Every structure is written in structure tokens, then in C-alpha cells.
Image (tube, rainbow, N blue to C red):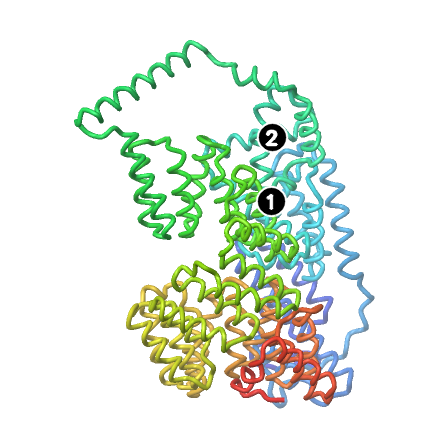
């Protein structure tokens, strides 16, 4: 072989995949990639595309590292290449003494246009082609043009392709234009937005708009066929240029109101906002007599006959019941309805549903039964069944306040705070003094950082129900967010002095408030009273969580008391493993985590247990088992909260820190502003002694005046280690003022200034 040829027995895998020599320059690599890319159907062969992409990126890394090392005059650059490849989880180069790539560096390539410029060129041509489409209303046309753009060689680099995707997202989020409802569907499929929400949320504000629109489209599709058809007809009509007739306005505006309330983000992408506004203006001009006339447009003899028939049936039903020959169906349904409402008020949702089922079997159009059952299903998290009941309820009683209250609860559970506020407000327009709904709306306001409205709702609840512990808790949250710790503590005191403590309930609420402001002695004293009032498993477990780290015996006694009452308690088993972790009893961690994972109640909670067992294995130096558990836990984590929990646990126990950092970064891809995850990442970086990066991350976690003690104290520790004693003391004192035991919390993790 010549000096320019590769002297190895086995070419690197990327060279074989791209059918190139291992010494190929960057231009050759790119041409080979473009050639191979044309041979792959990216939609049907996703794995093949991924394999090709990885080979392409590996080839570029190989070439650039080799070029950089040779350019720097290094005697043997390939050890550095192998190291870089291992860090990127690539196959290291097959190289040994005497078997090196000997070649001259290629001439410097001509400067390439940046990703933004290239993506703009492709995007401009995409828009120009779409403007000339013969059929804007054919999905295939949009799919063809989008695929043509994605096949453009200028999008060969990942940053350029991502920039083009961002432009498509921005175009859709800017509002509907003719055909964009089809482009939305095509793009969601082509870019896999439906299946990969992290990818959607990485697209900035446009991504968040698309995220909510995709969710709302899915909710729309879960409705009854009748509702979907009715709403689809409305949306199609909105896209037509001809103005609506008066009868169309009367018939369709209630449907539009429903779509706007439930699916605002999706509607903005599939219908023109100006047209909707125009319809609203036209509707306001419709005289009331026209609406009445439209409602009376039916066959009067038929309805008269129907009313007479219903009266006769009711008389027959009442006669049968009074003669003792069996209860009338409406009477039986009323009894079941009363029972269902009773069970719903007692939080016995399964029993409530059974009662509502019986009521509906006797009276299939009983709106109150549908309303109650929908509420029970919402509390149980059975969203699909709840939505079906709400659809039926809307057809029977569109002004039932429970209809909007339930929808508000569903939106709140999904963190669609604006939708929740709209639904709760509509419910309160129909039922102004409903304490539950006012309280729920106040909680949503607080979650959305609308503190003034949250406080107003809490005050309104207290005006209607002066002893409401939840209202005091909400007020405490507002004051804590405003850094008024004294006012927050006063709210906890008010709960304890309320006339109606409802057993252990007020004590538990007060304990939560005291804990949140760092007053752990009062929190623990409140839970002592709660346990005395009601010695149930959950009260023991809540008290165990308030025990100081040094009081291990009392904490374990509480957990064991709870598990004695409820042996399969998911919370109890989890806290038992947490106690083992805190005590550094690694054998017990492995044993109890394995035992808990076998419990059916832990089916959806095994992620933490798997991670905990992995920590136990790692501490026993059984790294193969630890790696398997860490991988399983990572794959099971779906939300940014799940990922943060894993990262935090690994950092706290100082194991597999590079893996922990990668998991934290994955969590932040879903929510870049989550301070809990930023705190976990900063702590991980501090463990890794990367103090400058830790400081910057703690700055983001602390934010602008955020009153959270843990990141404040952690930042103080990092500043101390960087030599900033003044800044360190300022942060640590501020943290201890918020939560006096913060230093104990860090010391228990082995971290002291």
C-alpha cells in the first residue's frame, strides 16, 4: 500500500457504512452522506436513517480531530481521537503502532454559509413553491413540498435541519393561513412532534404553542363522534370566504364557544383569527327575536304529542310506585343520585360511580348523574371516560356548572392554567358562591404566578367559609412567594385556631404550611396532633418525612407503623427505601427496593425504586448491576420531574455523576426553567468540582428573587469554594433565614462550606 492509504486490518464502521476510505476529507464525507441519504426512505426506515446519521457524524469527528492534531504538530494524534470517540459513545478507531493514517492535510475548505442562512434559503423556496400549489387543500401537496425541502442537500447538517424545522414551527405558530391546518398535520408527523414532546418544546415559544395544540387536537379526537363532526363542520365553515347567514350564526356560535374554550391553541392554528372575530361581531348584531324564532322552528304538533306522552308516562310511573307494585324509575334514580352525591362528598369515588351508574340505568338522560359521575372520574384520573360523560352532559344541560368545573379540573391536572381559569370562571358565572371552584381557581392563579388574583380568590373563600384551612394554605403560599414569612406563619396559626378543625385535616394543612416556611418544630408538633386525632397510615408517613435526619429511629417507627396498617402502601414502601438510603444501609436498600418492586401497588412507581437499588449496587461496587438499574430507571422516566428525581438521587448519593448530569440535561430539555432541576444540576456539578459551571447554574436556579433556601445555600457553598467569602455568607444567611435547617440538610449529604 502507498503512504496515503489506510494501514489497518479493519476499516472503521463509519467508513464501511459510507463506502469511503478512512482517510477521506470532509468534502468526500459529505458527498458520500448525500449519496447514501437518497437511498433511504426516512419515514419508513427510521433506524437506517439514524445509523447513517451516526456514521456521518462519526466520520466528521474522526476527520476533524485528526486534522486538528496533525495541524498542531502532534506526533501521535490518534490516541486523542480514540478518547474523543469513546466520550461520544462511538467505536474507537482501529489503530496501533505502525498502523496509522498517513496523509497530507486537505486544503482549507471554502467557508460555508451558516445554518441560519442556509435554512432561510430552503425555507423561502418552500414558501414560494407552496404559494403556487394547485390545491392548497390537499394534504399530499404539503407533504410533497415539505419532503422536497427536507431532501435538499443544504439541510444535510443537523443545525441547518433544526433551523429549518424551527422556521416551520414559527410559521405555524404565527397563526392560520390557507392550507396551514394541513401543514400542521404533515409537519407533526414528519418531525415526530406527536411522539417526541421534548423535540417540540425545544422549539421555543412556537414549540410551546404547538405542544398545547397537539394536546388539544388529541382531546378533540377523544370526544364523541357527534361532537367531533359538529365541530369539524364549524371549522370548515370558518375557512370559507362567504359570510355566515343569521341562522348559521345562531346554530354555530355555541359550537364555536365550546371549541374556543376547550381548544384555543389548536383553533388558532387551524382557523383564521380575523374570521372568528368577524363572526363574533356579526353574532352580537343578531336580534333576540330572530334567536327565539329560530328556536321555535320545529313541528309543533309533534312536540305537543311528545309532551302529552311524557306527562302520561310520568302519571303511570307515579301510580305504579304508589300502588306498591314496584318503585317508579325516576324515584329509584333519585335515590341513587342522592347516594352518589353523598359518596362523592366523602371522596369515595368508586362507590359514587356505582350509584350514578344505577341512576343512569333507570334514567339514561339524568344530567345530574352524568355531572356527578364525570367529577368522580376526574378525581380518579379516568380522563377519557370523564370526557365522554361531559359530552353527554353538555348535550343535556349545557349550562350545568359542573360541566365547566370538571373541565377546569382536567385542564388544571394537565397544567393548562389559562384553560383552567377560563373554565372555572365560566362555572362561577353559573354558580357564583361555590367554594370548591373558587378555591380551585385560586390555586391555578398561584401556579401561574398570578398572586394578586390568587389572594383575591382565597379571601373570597374565607368570606364564604371562614374556617377554610385550604384558603389559609393558599394565602400562605402567596405570602411565601412574596418573601413575607411572618405573614405565611400567621396563616398556619390561623388554621390551628379555627373553630372547625375537621379531625386531623387542619393539623395536616398547618404542618404543610410550617414545613414550607422552614418551621419544622411547629410542623412536627402539628403532625403529632394529626396522628393523635386520626392514627392512619398517611398521617404516620407525613410525620416521618418531617423527622430530622438524626432522628432515624423515630422516622423508621412511623414508617413501620404505617406499613403495619397498610402493608402494600406505595408511599410507605417508598419512604422505607428512602430511609435506608439516608442511613446508608445499602444491603437494606437493595432488599427493600426489590421487595417493593414486586408489589402491584408499585407498578407505576418502580422508577425511583430501580434507581435506589442501582445506588445500593454502586455503593457495593457491583457496577454491572448498578448500570443495568440506572438504564432501566432512565428509560422509565417520561416527564421532566421524573428525570430530575433520578438526577437528584444520584447526585445526593455521589454515584455515576456523569450519568446524573446527562439525566439533568435531559430534564431541562423538557423544561429549561424548572428551578428544582437547575438546583439538581448545579449540585451535581458541585460534586464534580466544576465550580464555575455550578455557580452559573445555581444563579439560574435562584432566579430573580426566588425564595428557595436549597439553591441559595448551595450557591453559597460554591462561592466559598471559589474564594468569594462575602457572597458565600450572604447566600447562606439568606437561605437559613428562609429555612433554618438548610445547613443540616447539606451536612447530611456530606457537604459543608
Of the numbered discs 1 and 2, the one sitting upstream in the chain is 1
- Residue at point 53%, 54% (across, down): 195
- Residue at point 51%, 86% (across, down): 748
Mark 2, residue position: 236
How many labels were placed on the picture? 2
Report x, y in % for residue 54: 60, 67
Q: Quadrant of residue 114?
A: bottom right
Q: Is residue 42 visible?
A: no
CA–CA distance between discs 1 and 2?
18 Å
Residue 248 vertical placement versus 400 (above, below): above
Looking at the image, is mark 1 or mark 2 nearer the viewer? 2
| Disc number placed over residue 186 in the picture, else none | 1
Element assignment for label 2: helix
Report x, y in % for residue 612: 43, 77
Classify residue 446 as left or right of residue 546.
right
Q: Residues within 10 Å of mark 1 (few under 14, many from 20)?
A: many
Residue 512 vertical placement versus 167 (above, below): below
Q: Quadrant of the N terminus?
A: bottom right
| Disc number placed over residue 392 in the picture, else none | none
Classify residue 384 as left or right of residue 26.
left
- Front position in the image: 241 or 6: 241
Report x, y in % for residue 20: 64, 69
Q: Quadrant of residue 260?
A: top right
Report x, y in % for residue 732: 65, 82
- Front position in the image: 87 or 719: 719
Element assignment for label 1: helix
Q: Is residue 240 visible?
A: yes
Q: Quadrant of the C terminus?
A: bottom right
Residue 632 vertical placement versus 75 (above, below): above
- Residue at point 37%, 12% (across, down): 305
- Front position in the image: 445 or 411: 445
Amino acid at each position: 500500500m502507498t503512504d496515503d492509504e489506510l494501514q489497518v486490518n479493519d476499516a472503521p464502521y463509519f467508513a464501511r457504512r459510507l463506502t469511503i476510505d478512512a482517510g477521506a476529507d470532509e468534502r468526500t464525507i459529505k458527498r458520500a452522506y448525500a449519496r447514501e441519504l437518497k437511498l433511504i426512505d426516512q419515514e419508513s426506515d427510521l433506524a437506517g436513517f439514524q445509523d447513517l446519521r451516526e456514521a456521518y457524524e462519526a466520520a466528521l469527528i474522526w476527520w476533524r480531530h485528526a486534522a486538528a492534531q496533525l495541524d498542531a504538530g502532534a506526533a501521535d494524534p490518534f490516541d486523542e481521537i480514540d478518547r474523543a470517540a469513546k466520550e461520544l459513545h462511538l467505536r474507537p478507531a482501529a489503530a496501533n503502532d505502525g498502523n496509522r493514517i498517513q496523509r497530507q492535510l486537505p486544503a482549507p475548505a471554502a467557508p460555508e454559509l451558516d445554518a441560519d442562512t442556509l435554512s432561510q434559503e430552503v425555507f423561502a423556496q418552500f414558501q414560494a413553491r407552496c404559494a403556487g400549489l394547485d390545491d392548497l387543500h390537499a394534504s399530499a401537496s404539503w407533504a410533497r413540498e415539505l419532503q422536497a425541502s427536507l431532501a435538499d442537500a443544504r439541510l444535510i447538517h443537523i443545525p441547518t435541519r433544526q433551523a429549518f424545522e424551527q422556521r416551520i414551527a414559527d410559521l405555524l405558530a404565527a397563526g392560520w393561513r390557507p392550507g396551514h391546518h394541513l401543514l400542521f398535520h404533515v409537519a407533526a408527523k414528519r418531525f415526530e412532534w406527536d411522539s417526541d414532546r421534548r423535540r417540540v418544546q425545544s422549539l421555543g415559544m412556537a414549540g410551546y404553542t404547538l405542544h398545547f395544540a397537539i394536546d388539544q387536537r388529541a382531546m378533540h379526537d377523544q370526544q364523541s363522534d357527534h361532537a367531533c363532526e359538529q365541530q369539524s363542520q364549524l371549522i370548515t365553515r370558518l375557512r370559507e370566504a362567504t359570510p355566515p347567514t343569521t341562522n348559521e350564526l345562531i346554530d354555530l356560535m355555541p359550537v364555536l364557544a365550546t371549541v374556543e374554550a376547550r381548544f384555543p391553541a389548536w383553533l388558532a392554528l387551524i382557523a383564521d383569527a380575523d374570521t372568528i372575530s368577524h363572526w363574533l361581531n356579526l353574532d352580537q348584531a343578531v336580534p333576540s327575536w330572530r334567536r327565539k324564532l329560530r328556536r321555535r322552528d320545529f313541528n309543533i304538533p309533534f312536540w305537543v304529542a311528545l309532551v302529552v306522552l311524557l306527562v302520561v308516562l310520568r302519571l303511570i310511573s307515579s301510580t305504579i310506585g304508589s300502588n306498591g307494585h314496584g318503585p317508579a324509575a325516576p324515584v329509584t334514580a333519585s335515590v341513587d343520585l342522592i347516594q352518589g352525591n353523598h359518596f362523592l362528598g366523602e371522596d369515595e369515588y368508586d362507590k359514587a360511580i356505582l350509584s350514578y351508574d344505577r341512576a343512569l340505568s333507570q334514567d339514561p338522560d339524568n344530567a345530574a348523574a352524568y355531572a356527578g359521575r364525570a367529577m368522580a372520574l376526574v378525581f380518579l384520573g379516568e380522563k377519557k371516560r370523564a370526557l365522554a360523560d361531559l359530552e353527554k352532559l353538555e348535550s343535556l344541560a349545557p349550562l350545568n356548572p359542573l360541566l365547566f368545573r370538571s373541565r377546569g379540573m382536567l385542564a388544571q391536572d394537565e397544567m393548562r392554567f389559562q384553560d383552567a381559569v377560563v373554565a372555572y370562571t365560566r362555572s362561577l358565572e353559573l354558580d357564583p358562591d361555590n367554594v370548591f371552584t373558587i378555591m380551585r381557581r385560586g390555586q391555578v392563579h398561584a401556579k401561574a404566578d398570578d398572586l394578586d388574583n390568587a389572594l383575591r380568590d382565597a379571601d373570597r373563600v374565607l368570606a364564604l367559609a371562614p374556617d377554610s384551612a385550604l384558603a389559609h394554605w393558599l394565602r400562605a403560599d402567596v405570602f411565601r412567594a412574596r418573601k413575607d414569612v411572618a405573614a405565611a406563619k400567621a396563616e398556619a396559626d390561623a388554621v390551628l385556631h379555627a373553630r372547625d378543625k375537621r379531625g386531623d385535616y387542619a393539623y395536616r394543612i398547618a404542618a404543610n404550611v410550617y414545613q414550607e416556611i422552614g418551621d419544622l418544630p411547629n410542623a412536627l408538633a402539628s403532625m403529632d396532633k394529626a396522628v393523635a386525632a386520626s392514627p392512619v397510615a398517611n398521617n404516620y408517613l407525613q410525620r416521618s418525612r418531617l423527622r430530622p435526619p438524626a432522628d432515624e429511629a423515630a422516622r423508621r417507627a412511623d414508617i413501620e407503623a404505617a406499613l403495619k396498617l397498610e402493608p402494600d402502601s406505595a408511599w410507605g414502601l417508598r419512604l422505607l427505601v428512602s430511609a435506608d438510603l439516608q442511613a446508608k444501609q445499602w444491603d437494606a436498600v437493595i432488599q427493600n427496593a426489590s421487595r417493593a418492586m414486586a408489589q402491584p401497588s408499585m407498578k407505576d412507581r418502580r422508577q425511583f425504586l430501580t434507581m435506589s437499588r442501582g445506588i445500593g449496587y454502586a455503593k457495593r461496587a457491583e457496577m454491572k448491576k448498578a448500570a443495568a438499574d440506572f438504564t432501566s430507571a432512565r428509560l422509565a422516566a417520561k416527564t421532566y420531574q421524573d428525570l430530575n428525581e433520578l438526577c437528584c438521587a444520584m447526585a445526593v448519593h455521589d454515584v455515576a455523576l456523569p450519568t446524573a448530569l446527562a439525566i439533568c440535561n435531559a430534564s431541562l430539555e423538557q423544561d429549561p426553567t424548572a428551578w428544582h432541576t437547575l438546583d439538581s444540576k448545579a449540585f451535581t456539578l458541585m460534586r464534580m468540582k466544576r465550580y464555575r459551571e455550578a455557580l452559573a447554574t445555581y444563579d439560574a436556579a435562584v432566579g430573580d428573587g426566588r425564595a428557595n433556601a436549597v439553591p441559595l445555600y448551595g450557591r453559597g457553598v460554591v462561592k466559598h469554594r471559589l474564594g468569594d467569602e462575602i457572597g458565600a455568607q450572604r447566600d447562606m444567611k439568606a437561605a437559613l433565614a428562609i429555612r433554618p435547617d438548610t445547613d443540616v440538610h447539606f451536612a447530611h449529604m456530606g457537604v459543608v462550606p
